[in-house]
Image: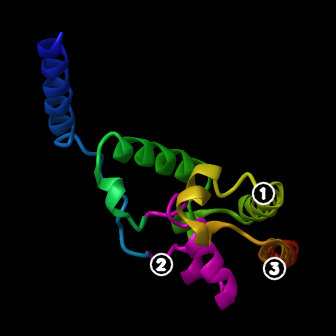
Amino acid sequence: MRIVVRSSLITLLLAFIVIQFFQPEKNSEEVSSNHIFKQVEVPENIQTLLTNACLDCHSNHTNYWWYNHIAPVSWMVDNHITEGKSELNFSDWGTMDIFEKITILEEICQEAERKSMPLKSYRAIHPQAKLSDQQIAELCDWTTKLAEELLAKAAGE
């Protein structure tokens, strides 16, 4: 019995070591001219909020922590980033049409108010990503104002 347990532990350890060689590609592009921060004048408090709570999964640049480099955690993180960017990628803001931007701004506020974003698993590990009611109100005020500006711009075109 002891030999079976020892052999199993050694096999698991070797498997863990081997999977470390199969890491996903890192999400680490530089900030492009299409990024929302380059396209829109974003107030500093909203920039901080977006950086802390949104951009790791919703842009082309993720700030990785030490545990993000260890498989299988790295695979789960990569999956979250891929899914997040497929829903919203702030790095592509400049390539979106006005009505897509307006829809996204409305969804940002709704997701924050429902506290469904950032994900609970992300908030658990990143306390700075937990949005207070005041931060959610500030975010919604900003998204509403920007959506109204974009709508006025679309009406003027």
Which residue is at 88% across, 73% downward? 155
**If you read the primary sequence from the N terminus, does the residue marked by circle 3 or circle 2 appear first?**
2
Q: In the rendered structure, which disc, 3 or 1, sits on the residue that comes first in sequence?
A: 1
> Please, what is the three-letter code of the amino acid marked with disc 2?
Ser
Nearer the observer: mark 3 or 1; the answer is 3
Q: Which residues are magenta?
A: 32-60
**Residue 23 quadrant:** top left
Task: Classify 10 Å Cα crowding around label 3: few (below 14), some (14-19), many (20 and above).
Answer: some
Residue bearing the label numbered 1: 107
In the depicted structure, whether residue 96 falls above or below residue 76 = below
- Residue at point 86% right, 73% down? 144
Say which residue label 2 marks. Answer: 33
Please tell me which residue lies in front, 77 or 44.
77
Left or right of 72, for residue 94: right
Which residue is under mark 3? 138
Residue 115's x, y, as percent? 77, 56
